[in-house]
Amino acid sequence: MLEVHGLKKRYGRKNVLDNVSFTVQPNTLTCLIGLNGAGKSTILKGIMGLIPLDSGTVLIDGTGSKDAVAYIPDLQTMPGHMTVGDALDYMNDHYADWNGETAESLLRTFQLMRTDVITDLSKGNQAKFNLILGFALDRPYLILDEPLAGIDIFTKEQIAWIFTSEFMEGRGILMTTHEIDEIEHLIDRVIFLQDGRVIDEHDAEEMRELHGKSVQDRMREVYAR
Amino acid sequence: MKKYLLLTNEELKRTAKPYLIVVAVLMLLEFILTAAITKMHEGKIETFMRENGVSMQEAIDAYGKSSFAQVVASGPFLLILGAGMMVILISAFVIWYRDWFGKTNYIYRLLLLPGSRSSIYFAKLTTIVLLMFGFVAIQWLMFFVLAPLHDLLLPPELFERVSIAAVLERSGLMYLYDFYLPNFALIYLFALLLIVFIFTLVLIERSYRKGKKVIRIFLQFVILGAVYGATLLVINSDHLFANEKGMLFLAFTFLYLAFLVIIGLRTVSKKITV
Amino acid sequence: MRKYMHLTAMLAVITIGIGSFFGYAAAQPDLRFRLVEQQGDISWKDRLELTGVINDEDWFTVRGNGKVETSSRFFLADQTLGNDMYEMDAAYPELMRGQPYVNVVSESEERVSLYGLNEKTIEVRVWEKKKSKLTTTVIPKQDIAEDATLHRLISADGNTADLLLEEFDYQNEEVTSKFSIVTVDLKGKRMSKRMIEEGTSHNGDLTVIFDQERTTRENAIFVRTISDGEEVESQSHFVLEAGKLVPFPELDRLVRKDSYGLSQYGDLLVQLPNEEENEPRHEVTIFDLRTMKGKELKLPARSTAKEGDRMIDVVDGKLVLAQQKQDAKEGIVFVQIHDIEKDETVFEAKLKGNEDVQFRLLHANLAER
């Protein structure tokens, strides 16, 4: 279980995160939802230690170690000149739990070549490449920041596919996205954020069955206030 | 250790192309400059001979022979060396900033890597230090190429062959290339201090926001002033003998260096933000 | 390891470049002086040791066998250790630490004493050698000008000490010196001062000949020089006795007025002649304060240089003269060891350096090794 408790972050006088707490269970897909500037990205970066938090704790299966989490940001993180192949070798060199076979398999599925220069790839291909860097780590938790942002429909479908594939097995996913449509059916849990605070939390299945509402419906309700 | 070595290699790899270009440009400039200064001297002699109707020997008595030492001691040549030093100092900034403002956000990748973050710091520091010593090494070898070039370009009567040791002494470069190892180490210790100081400033700038950032950077300069001030006090003290002053000064330098490194490491570890 | 290719390449370049640099540095020949000619008793060769300065920079010691030892060139090390003046610093650091700038040091078998002038006080420090103990006494300063100079200790008996003091009179257009004896009472912690009575003639510059210690003769020696601004007209010498300047005619007779003044080496006063061109001999005047007798030594002049830098030292009854030939490519130094009592040169040598160096002798050592 990935537990986040009492996260606080201030920039000057603004509380970007105000006592944020939630959990992500293994084998579930949890979605952080909020308008722009609600603090979604900050939470993810805070969990990964990319941004120092003022207070709060992050526990992954009971420890403070981040070794069980893989993070997929929405920007390119490998050095500019690298090819896809270079990047995969880099990951292999640095990570003991790098799964080369998973990487190769995804490479084929996404139709990317080792010789492709990363920064020359289209936005969609870059997004797929980022997914490989995350999914090829044999880690039980995966955090994704806007994996579908600004990508064409066909690529979106390819990416959405990965969330139903074998590569999802056993993983707890935490993601943020604006593109609810494509993954509505995959979401297990939703957390609504506003102004750095958790204002609502729902089990998605419950919402659909008991209340007949989709996540999008609920969104409109929550943010209309 | 493995992480540190891999990261160092990666930093070097990324810097290889621009570094080689700079080296090539500086080498080319030195070639051209050597040839130009040498030929200019020859030209002056010939002009003097022509205008005053004298023999070459008399012209030489007036102007003197040309030596490679003169080439190295010339303003333009020293400017080239100065440019090299500037490149290293600028690199100390760029090696960090390119990870935030480059084509990609490599800083994310670095901070996500498993293991200690101090490897990041030391990898970048090592890289800059290696780049610096690379310049020192290549420049040293260049002396042995340029000196014969100078000699080749002139008729034997016109030039004076000097040893590279004499060249260093006459041009003032003997401080950068001090034959006495403790002196050499001391000079480059100060270069290291400068680089580490730059690292500290950059890391503070990348970790804190507006007000705090300015205050903390200002604080670093205050501390620098305090260390320098304490050093001056030691040097001007009547109660210490020269050897004691020397050792105390060395101790201050090491302590200050350690202090800056520790601040840098802590900042990278706990305060840095993407 | 393909993974570390760039690192390896960089290290290789640096190793080659900087390695060759240090190789070149190590290959630089050490400064050596070769003995190219020698005459006389060769046994002096191994005892001869000249300490001096090369090119205004490094302190070095040249041995008779030609080997040169240079002092440490480390920026942060004290280059001056090995210099006479700093021998005291090295030998008695507790005594010398933070000493007043103006001071006089006096050493005996049991103790070393330092008398110094501070801004408002006179400071007396005594270091007991056997007990390794330092005692400091501070006495308020009275009636002593700020720019006063302490020249020497005249006498001391543990409770009081008499010191020779020079102050300056700025009243006339020319600045003149006034000498006095300062008596320091260590027990009572006070001082008194009495002017030195001079002879009748008040013209001319009065100077103390020497203010270093290491003489058995307690009293200071003065010289009054009368000149017309450019040339020296006459010199008269005085010795300080019981607070009065008493004429010293023996020195007057011996000293050449048109020459440099006297230098002191222990109990010997030495005067070098003016620089002569192509003279066959140096004529050196020696006055022995123990016997109160003087004589003139004639040393063969070896250097044919137009202007030579002659440097001497007197040690163990021998005059050591070193002269540098100025216009040669390699630093050439002529050395002579001359026995003062017998007035004969016992050893001469010509040393040739493997580099063009400017040599300045500071002191010579002739101890048995």
Image (cartoon, helix red, strand yellow):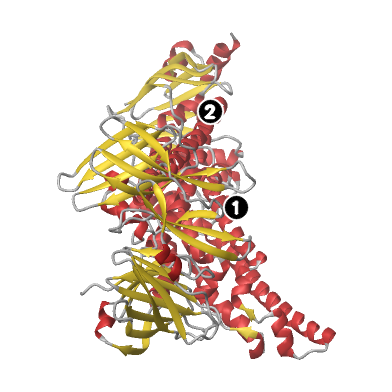
Q: Where, by quadrant of the figure, is residue C73 drawn? A: bottom left
Q: Secondary structure at mark 1?
A: helix
The amino acid at mark 1 is: Asp
Q: Where, by quadrant of the figure, is residue C335 drawn? A: bottom left
**Chain at tag 1:** A
Tell me if C272 is positioned left or right of B24 in this view: left
Q: Is residue A194 visible?
A: yes
Task: Give x and y (percent) for residue C176.
Answer: 55, 48
Is B165 drawn above or below residue A72 in the view shown?
Answer: below
Which of these two is toward me, B54 or A172? B54
Which of these two is toward me, B123 or B230? B230
Please state which of the two labelled residues, at mark 2 or mark 1, is closer to the viewer: 2
Q: Residue furthest top?
A: A225
Q: Which residue is mark 2?
A: B215
Q: Which disc number belongs to residue C6?
A: none
Q: Which residue is mark 1?
A: A120
Q: Residue furthest front?
A: C200
Mark 1: give few (<14), some (14-19) or many (20+) Cα within 10 Å. Answer: few
Q: Is residue B115 visible?
A: no
Which of these two is toward me, B55 or C351? C351
**Chain at tag 2:** B
Residue appearing at x 45%, y 64% in the figure: C10
Which of these two is toward me, C36 or C291? C291
Q: CA distance from mark 2 to mark 1?
A: 41 Å
Q: Secondary structure at mark 2?
A: helix
The amino acid at mark 2 is: Ile
Is B233 drawn above or below residue C104 in the view shown?
Answer: above
Is C211 drawn above or below residue A143 in the view shown?
Answer: below
Q: Where, by quadrant of the figure, is residue A178 drawn? A: top right
